[in-house]
């Protein structure tokens, strides 16, 4: 296969313009106010898949947001690659921390991205990375170099737990049949250190509500005499970690995969500077579970984080009130062997059990997914390795990630195929944060590398 | 002095209509968006004081919201009563819990108020109670029964800590000179149990901010490896109470006034049903400092309550984010001898000292005030006692309140006179809460009782 470099150089402006158009649509799946925009994004993806060379594209209805399915089958005897991605994005809050509006993409140069980066919600996660695959297909079809069959499955509910995906996959096993699944929804270690994600954490996301008195009370008249739901909630949350930052939920660690000393030593070889890490986040110290390094804490160990908390008066000035209710959104990242449904139950049972007298507690499970570890001796992994070697001139490093793409475990179970996670994002891209961006260099490097994967996967499958 | 009953009966509708007009103006001092309304309310109060018979009324500028001053001096040899009240109100949040809009007053009958109650923010605290004094003055002037001199000082910053009042009082000692200060900004035990508030708690109100990483982070990639400001904040707040609900700030209790066994026994005689208390709040148990009764916890003991907490994603759905910052508004109710400025300093020092590595903590003092206990053998107290006996047919009970009116201590220091707290509100009036209301019976009973205070205070002063 020829290098895509020349084609990319010639079409670079259009590749960026098309992505920018896609980024302008606020496809926030978590907020029903944006329903029309989410649906509009599905339509836009469908149109682009058709333009890029798919023979058949359809918008498949689900109980939630639709899934865009596309395919180009050139020869049934050749291998089939299934590309998965998502067209929905995270909510952009807090809006006031964005330097430019999240849905008005702008290209700005940064220290890490002298070639420029596109700043917009979804630029990296996952519209930008998903769109690399659409443009890679365009390159292969327009230059008659597509070496195998390809299927696309682009969903609109990834940021809210892919709630309709299992329903869709189990109903469409035949349609989705494939030899390998390819996803770009992760990152790489650095621009000059390509990596393939081989481990993903699972997730259990819950919302808790603590109710005290049946109405907001004057803190002067009632303060000290009734349980204050906010004070109680802080006590309950605080008790979920002990002084070594171990999670205190009974049974939480029962199924946690224990890595051998050798494996941990190998992990420790990955290039990492604690000083740079702290500097990039402007913190004076890291923080976490005793006995584990920073890279272990965010990959091979389960965690519990409050993602949001609210209650009482949060406006300007002061209000001396005891709130009737306090709330928190809490997520737990899980590691292989921990079952997210079991963990959600353990959390619920424990959290309800530690509620003191004088309050009532509700735990509402949101969504979740299983952790996953991919083998590094599969055909797919080897093809990806070769593809990176071709375009980066370096062998990629296998990397465990702290994030969760729960659907990888689902795919293995339902479609019986392995997933390869070729991510081109960087840690500094600020996904899920204000000022999310995606380097133009990374975007184009992805478009260049993906066709090589098609090539080597087809070659190795012979 | 003749009973005001007939006059009140004749003018009842107008008395209600005038108050309703005043309640329609959203004079929320905590929110600068309502600045015009706060100023408009001052104008309205000025107009009504003039109409009620004051000889001189002016709007006095201060560094904050203005103070409305009015007076009617009939004879310099006669005693002078200074009436204090406030025309500002608490923010109405959470709005969705109001059965009718907070600034569209409606009269509804309730079980406790078969004669009807006015539902609106400020109906009891303090527009309704302040306006009783205006109407009582009207009665005395229109029927030629005013027995002494009267001065009014109605401020617009009580709900945000009376920040300009000290400035004003110290600048106007002569203008404000008086023999007794009369305030209706408290409650009574029950409609058939009149009471005079003799103790008030002090207050220290602070806002805290915990900053972790310099931006919101993806909880999958960073979860477990960096300090999560929300988790840290919950731990810090939780640690402010020990397992017996004592406050853990070093030195916090050093100056707390210790009541004798006898005093506590006398307090315990006040009618109180724990069952009804729990039922009214729909809670299965009370909660508070070990070793103290409910009535002690909310009157003679200092407390620490979170009045608001926020951080991270608090919208619909789920967002897997580690917030860069988390915040809380915290207030401490103080008892006599505790100095609010010292306590604020102790809090700040302690809270900053317990911040773990990996976060930065800011403590911003909001406002505060001293606690106060009034004697029950003063002329003023005796006059109030007789006034209640006249209109309720019962001797009022001296009562310690958990609330704070910091200005009482200020008045004693700067104006050298005692304050009498004649409150006509009820605990169930939901001040500072949604659906605040004030019983029509209570409103009119206040107008009836106040002139009797004027009468007896003048008599006893002879």
Image (cartoon, coloured by chain):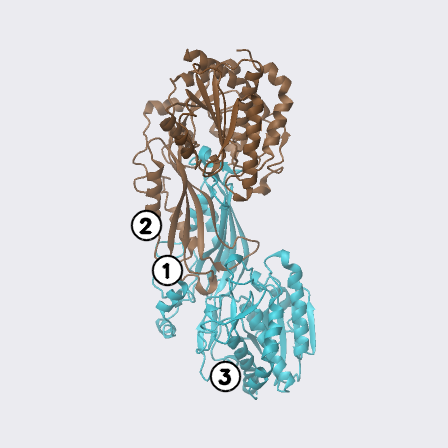
Chain colours: A brown, B cyan
Question: How far apart are labels 1 and 2 at the CA level?
Answer: 17 Å
The chain carrying label 1 is: B
- Label 2 near label 1: C-beta < 8 Å? no
- Answer left or right for A266 relative to A57: left
- Answer left or right for B90 relative to A330: right
Q: Is residue B449 visible?
A: yes
Q: Is residue A15 above or below residue B70?
A: above
Residue B119 percent across, percent down from the top left: 53, 68
Foreground tag (1 vs 2): 2
Which disc, if any, is residue A287?
Answer: none
- Answer left or right for B423 relative to A174: right
The chain carrying label 3 is: B
| Crowd class of label 1 (few under 14; some 14 to 19; many from 20; radius 10 Å) | many
Placement of the N terminus of chain B among the 4 image quadrants: bottom right
Q: Is residue A425 visible?
A: no
Residue B82 percent across, percent down from the top left: 60, 76
Q: Which residue is mark 2?
A: A353
* Mark 3 element type: helix
Q: Which residue is mark 1?
A: B287
Q: Is residue A1 above or below residue B152?
A: above
Q: Which residue is mark 3?
A: B391
Taking the spot 35% from the left edge, 67% from the top edge, the residue there is B275
> Going from the N terminus, do you reach mark 3 or mark 1 first?
1
Name the one closer to the observer, B147 or A358: A358
* Dot 3 and dot 2 within a common chain: no
């Amino acid at each position: 296969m020829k290098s895509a470099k020349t084609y990319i150089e010639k079409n670079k402006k259009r590749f960026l313009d098309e992505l920018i158009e896609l980024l302008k649509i606020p496809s926030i799946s978590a907020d029903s106010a944006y329903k029309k925009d989410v649906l509009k994004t599905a339509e836009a993806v469908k149109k682009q898949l058709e333009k890029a060379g798919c023979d058949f594209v359809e918008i498949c209805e689900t109980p939630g947001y639709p899934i865009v399915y596309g395919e180009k089958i050139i020869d049934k005897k050749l291998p089939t690659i299934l590309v998965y991605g998502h067209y929905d994005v995270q909510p952009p809050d807090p809006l006031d921390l964005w330097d430019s509006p999240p849905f008005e993409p702008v290209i700005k140069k940064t220290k890490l991205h002298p070639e420029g980066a596109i700043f917009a919600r979804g630029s990296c996660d996952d519209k930008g990375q998903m769109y690399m695959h659409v443009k890679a297909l365009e390159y292969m079809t327009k230059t008659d170099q597509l070496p195998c069959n390809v299927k696309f499955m682009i969903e609109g509910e990834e940021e809210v737990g892919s709630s309709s995906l299992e329903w869709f996959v189990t109903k469409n096993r035949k349609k989705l049949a494939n030899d390998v699944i390819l996803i770009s929804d992760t990152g790489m270690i650095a621009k000059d250190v390509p990596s393939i994600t081989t481990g993903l954490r699972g997730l259990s996301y819950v919302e808790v509500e603590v109710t005290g008195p049946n109405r907001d009370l004057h803190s002067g008249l009632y303060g000290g005499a009734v349980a204050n739901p906010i004070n109680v909630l802080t006590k309950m949350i605080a008790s979920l970690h002990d002084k070594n930052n171990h999670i205190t939920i009974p049974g939480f660690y029962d199924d946690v995969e224990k890595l051998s000393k050798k494996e941990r030593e190998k992990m420790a070889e990955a290039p990492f500077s604690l000083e740079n890490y702290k500097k990039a986040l402007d913190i004076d110290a890291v923080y976490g579970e005793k006995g584990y390094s920073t890279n272990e804490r965010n990959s091979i160990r389960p965690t519990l984080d409050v993602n949001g908390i609210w209650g009482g008066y949060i406006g300007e000035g002061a209000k001396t009130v005891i709130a009737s209710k306090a709330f928190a959104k809490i997520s737990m990242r899980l590691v292989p062997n921990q079952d997210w449904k079991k963990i959600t139950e353990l959390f619920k049972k424990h959290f309800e059990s530690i509620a003191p007298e004088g309050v009532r507690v509700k735990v509402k499970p949101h969504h979740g997914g299983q952790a996953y570890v991919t083998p590094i001796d599969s055909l797919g992994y080897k093809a990806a390795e070769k593809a990176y070697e071709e375009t980066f001139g370096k062998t990629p490093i296998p990397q465990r990630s702290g994030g969760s793409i729960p659907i990888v475990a689902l795919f293995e179970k339902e479609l019986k195929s392995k997933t390869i996670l070729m991510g081109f994002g960087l840690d500094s891209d600020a996904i899920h944060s204000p000022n999310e961006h995606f380097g133009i260099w990374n975007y184009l490097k992805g478009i260049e590398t993906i066709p090589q994967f098609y090539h080597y996967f087809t070659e190795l499958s012979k």
